[in-house]
Image: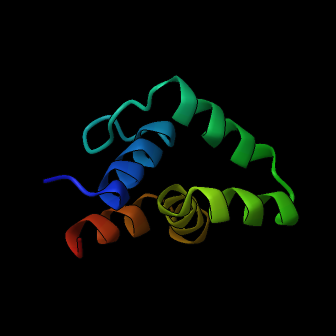
Amino acid sequence: MTTDRDNAVRQVLWVIGDRENGWQPGGFATALLEAWAHADHYNDMQLTAAFPALGEAVAASKRGGREALLVMLSHG
């Protein structure tokens, strides 16, 4: 069974260009991820509070890129 966290990680992987491990996000998730790309710190926190799985994946991507996301998948 795929968790929300795994789904979020795979969506972020897709957005950063990893088509092998990522899953193409739907329209709503795409819009959220685009908003995250433009969010200041306050709005980043607001988005993370509302969508914690995506927030965790976005934060990992900012910290460690693709490798950090793959670690998240392997430690499910």
Q: Image quadrant for the C terminus?
A: bottom left
Q: Is residue 38 left or right of residue 49?
A: right
Q: Quadrant of residue 49?
A: bottom right
The one nearer the camera, 9 or 2, is 2
Residue 66 x/y as whole percent: 43, 58
Residue located 39% across and 65% down the image: 67
Give the camera-side residue of 26 and 23.
26
Q: Nearer the viewer, residue 29 or 22?
A: 29
Q: Residue furthest bottom?
A: 75
Report how many numbered discs are placed on residues in the image: 0
On the picture, is 69 further left or further right than 46?
A: left
Viewer-nearest residue: 24 or 32: 32
Render colour scheme: rainbow
Residue 13: percent from left, percent from top: 41, 47
Q: Residue at x 25, y 38 (%)?
A: 20
Q: Quadrant of the N terminus?
A: bottom left
Which quarter of the figure has residue 74?
A: bottom left
Residue 71 in the image: above or below residue 14 = below
Specify the farthest residue to the top: 27
Horizontal side, residue 70 vs residue 16: left or right: left
Residue at the spot 53% in from the left edge and 36% down from the top edge: 29
The vertical placement of 33 against 68, above or below, is above
Residue found farthest to the front = 50
Q: Residue at x 33, y 41 (%)?
A: 22
Q: Could you say where residue 39 lies in the image, as x and y percent from the top left?
A: 81, 51
Residue 73 position, x and y percent, is 27, 64
